[in-house]
Amino acid sequence: MRFPGKRKSKHYFPVTEKGRVPFGTDLEKSGDVYVVGIDQLLVDVEAHVDEDFLKTSGIPKGESVLLEDRTIDEIYLRLKEEERVRGEFAGGAIGNTIHNYSVLADDHSYLLGTISQQINVGDYAFHYVRNTSSRVNLSHLHPCQGPMGRAICFITPDGERSFGIGRGIMDELPPQAVPEELIAGASALVLTAYLLRKEDAPIHGAAMRAIEIANRNNVPVVLALGTESLVREKRDFLRELIRSSVNILAGNFQEFGALTGQSDPLLAGQDALDLADLALMTHDRQGLYVCGLVDREFARRTKDQIHSKSIAEYNRFEYSRAMLASDCEKPLKIYSHINPYLGGPTKIRNTNGAGDSALSALLHDLTANTHHRLESPTSPKHKAKFLTYSSIHQICKYANRVSYEVLRRNSPRLTQGLPEREDSLEQAYWAN
């Protein structure tokens, strides 16, 4: 596994110390390391419109609304006639995340969901398969009669995104289609709150069954929060579910604010750690935050400048690696923040998928930790049961870099991994 990017002269896993992976090790024979995602499989249609188009189509600006399949067809035909469509991509929050994970890790993953039983060249299902990494295993998809789900992303001149969703067959994944052995052996189970919106939908039962299997087998559960309106709608349910069954949260500041009731990102992250063990929060042009827990015995002070905001000296222990609360005798909350990479792209073509790509970087770090623990269990990196391979500060930098790659493109999905990155002061710190 290359982690976290191609390296020409430096090894991310040092090989000169005792307990490290020797050159002769056949990494392909190591334990099977993968993540499993469950999603409402969607094809994303990107269209540039003005606000009048949104009003006449009944789409609230900045929100995501569910529409009848017939209405989606009518809007799509109108967009085509007016030449407003800029691209059609395989989509879905978890679909994007799993695809980007496999591109970054150059390793396999699994995606669960529904797909049209009969696939024809040029149809939506064909485009979905064609635009998904060959490293993503789709063999467990559940075939159904009917059209795939479609999400039209309406982008107004100010860059704001609004969504019209046509469900198609995307909610038809039955609980019995969830493969227990596959989830039991995963490094992480990744879901989105969208799966839990309709309690009478088959996919709701499938998601809850998958969570139960993951909890029973000590597989970390990762939940992407969806949208602010969804979090507000399902707030009490989500808080209880997260507290009892979810380990890692991912979303933007608006979603975390709706979940916690906080109007400050650090305080929202602090409160989120009362529910989960790790939180990844994007905050538009203000960058992103990673908030986690570590046992006080293994807390590591930063070598960078100390910062204070709503939490005094919040980044003092940002060189610490995250742990589950259940693995901490004296849990300590830790925080790290990073501004957009290089200030962000000069021109942001599309913000769709930036948060999903940040989560894919975090997943890559989780599986790197699993991989290294399997290959070198006596390494000093595993003197405690850490959740991540890198510190939360390093994860911030990696997630930030991956988000930048998506922001400067016109697609929520990566086509290749990252270029070689520079070794950091922190890596030298960990080596000592």
Image (cartoon, rainbow, N blue to C red):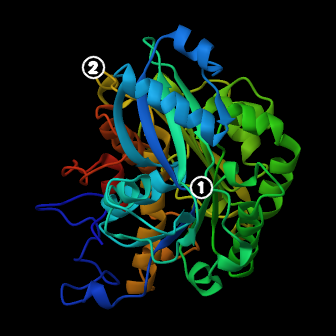
In this view, 149 is above or below 137:
above
Q: Residue at x 51, y 48 (%)?
A: 301
Tell me the SS state at disc 2: loop
Picture residue at 11% right of the left edge, 61% below the top: 8
In the picture provided, is 196 more to the left or to the right than 112? right
- Look at 47% across and 16% down and name the residue there: 156
| Label 2: few (<14), some (14–19) or many (≥20) C-alpha neighbours in 10 Å | few
At label 1, counting other C-alpha atoms closer than 10 Å, the crowd grade (few under 14, some 14-19, many 20 or more) is many
The reply to whether residue 312 is visible in this rendering is: no
Residue 42, horizontal then vertical, whole percent? 51, 50
Whether residue 346 sits left or right of residue 290 in the image: it is: left
Give the x, y percent position of residue 408. Answer: 29, 31
Q: Which mark, residue 40?
A: 1
Q: CA distance from mark 1 to mark 2?
A: 33 Å
- Residue type at mark 1: give it: Gln
- In the rendered view, tell whether residue 226 sits above or below residue 122: above
Question: From what the image shows, is residue 8 above or below residue 21?
Answer: above
Quick one: label 1 or label 2, which is nearer the N terminus? Answer: 1
Residue at the extreme left: 9
- Tags 1 and 2 touching, CB below 8 Å: no
Nearer the viewer's eye, disc 1 or disc 2? 1
Please identify the quarter of the rendering in which residue 268 is found: top right
Quarter of the picture holding the C terminus: bottom left
* Residue at x-position 54% and y-position 77%: 186
SS for dot 1: loop
Q: Quadrant of the N terminus?
A: bottom left
Left/right of residue 243 with respect to residue 407 in the rendered view: right
Residue that carries the numbered disc 2 in the rendered image = 346
Q: Position of residue 174 (x, y in %)?
A: 71, 71
Place of residue 129 in the rendered image (x, y in percent of width and height, measured from the top left): 37, 61
Which of the 4 image quarters holds residue 328? bottom right
For badge 2, the amino acid type reads Thr
